[in-house]
Image (spheres, rainbow, N blue to C red):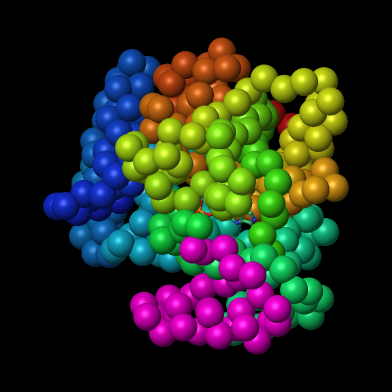
Amino acid sequence: MKAVILHSEVSQEASPDDLDTLDQVEGVARALKELGHETVNVTFSLNLKNLSAELGRIAPDVAINLVETVGGAGRLIHLAPSLLEHLSIPYTGCPAEAIFVTSGKTLAKKTLAGAGLPTPMWISSGEGADGQDFSPGRFIVKSAWEHASLGLDEHSVIHAQTSGQLLEVLRAKESVDGSEWFAERFVEGREFNVPILADGEGPRILPVSEIVFDAYPEGKVRVVGYRAKWEAESFEYNNTPRRFDFPESDHALIKQMEMLALNCWSVFGLAGYARADFRVDENGKPWVLEINANPCIAPDAGFEASARRAGLSYTDIVGSLVEDAMARRGRRSGTSVRA
Ligand SMILES: Nc1ncnc2c1ncn2[C@@H]1O[C@H](COP(=O)(O)OP(=O)(O)O)[C@@H](O)[C@H]1O
Ligand SMILES: [Mg+2]
């Protein structure tokens, strides 16, 4: 088969999260070749007219959608699957609608709340607390559309006495860059990732991991911020290892998070692969922090580490994604023989 690897633009002064895109492209290209497919790399930009013509010329059998930003913005990533749908090109990962709803974090939270799934209380400047009860405490201030922990560190966590105080912080943030921010109740406890991978047969939960805040001094804010994700020299990067082995006493909690992640899979109409992130509060209750549709599959990322624990190679991940894309295409065009 001929596969297009569709990826974000990488700027000249590439940041670590940009370079991550290149790692993913290289890893996926190697895996596709191993599977016997021909590959062509295409950069997804805002020039949709040129892109349509280029994709038309290439006429791929499948597109691997690795697009994480468009024109530098997280807000536009649904354009990639939208264009592929428009051009009737089968593609890996989540549908355009699921990408849009999960990448808009307050949109995702509204969907979670509407489905009765546990999402921490939040406030955004457009809507205030939106009928939710405010009580004083710690909140984390986050971008509504940007991911990869951009701009996120210990200063993002603040104590608020009133909702008015939070709204003031949000308006100040928004006046700087014009983008949308929101404040969410800070859940102090443990952090877990639940990855899901689909193949032609449906979604399968991969081993759950915990991000351990190792040797964090008393009082140091525990967040997986920009340094923890990208700055290899930092304390945060080196002290947030992943853990896969859990005592018996954690099994019920892990099962509960797996069930919640599968619920999210159907509520958001996810496909291909996704990762649900959780924090667990002092009462042992897991809260969904976010749904990562099409999570990072760089060869050293958490998703790959989980797949490896399940006995899957990198090539198996890419093979499953392609298989799932083709099975969905078959179902849409009515050529599937499965019920
Ligand atoms: N409500 C919250 N309570 C506690 N920690 C949070 C909360 N929201 C975010 N965090 C911390 O910040 C990190 C990044 O936030 P997240 O919403 O996942 O954004 P991103 O899309 O940038 O990964 C999380 O992995 C977690 O460590
Ligand atoms: Mg996250």
Residue 195 visible in the displayed image: no
Residue 213 visible in the displayed image: yes
Vertical side of 144 occupied by 218: above or below: above
Residue at image x 70%, y 55%? 187
Vertical side of 21 occupied by 221: above or below: below
Q: Nearer the viewer, residue 102 or 169?
A: 169
- For the N terminus, the image quarter is top left
Residue at image x 63%, y 62%? 108
- For the C terminus, the image quarter is top right
- Image coords of residue 250 (percent x, y): 79, 28
Residue at image x 49%, y 75%? 180
- Image coords of residue 113 (percent x, y): 76, 63
Farthest residue toward the front?
A: 218
Farthest residue toward the left?
A: 12
- Image coords of residue 249 (percent x, y): 84, 25
Q: Which corner quadrant of the image does residue 199 belong to?
A: top right
Q: Nearer the viewer, residue 168 or 339?
A: 168
- Image coords of residue 154 (percent x, y): 50, 57
As drawn, is 192 to the left or to the right of 42?
right
Q: Which corner quadrant of the image does residue 258 belong to?
A: top right
Does the stretch in magenta take in 34?
A: no
As drawn, is 256 to the left or to the right of 33?
right
Q: Nearer the viewer, residue 277 or 33?
A: 277
Vertical side of 107 occupied by 11: above or below: above
Q: Which residues are magenta?
A: 155-183
As drawn, is 68 to the left or to the right of 181?
left
Residue at image x 46%, y 83%? 172
As drawn, is 238 to the left or to the right of 212?
left
Farthest residue toward the top?
A: 311
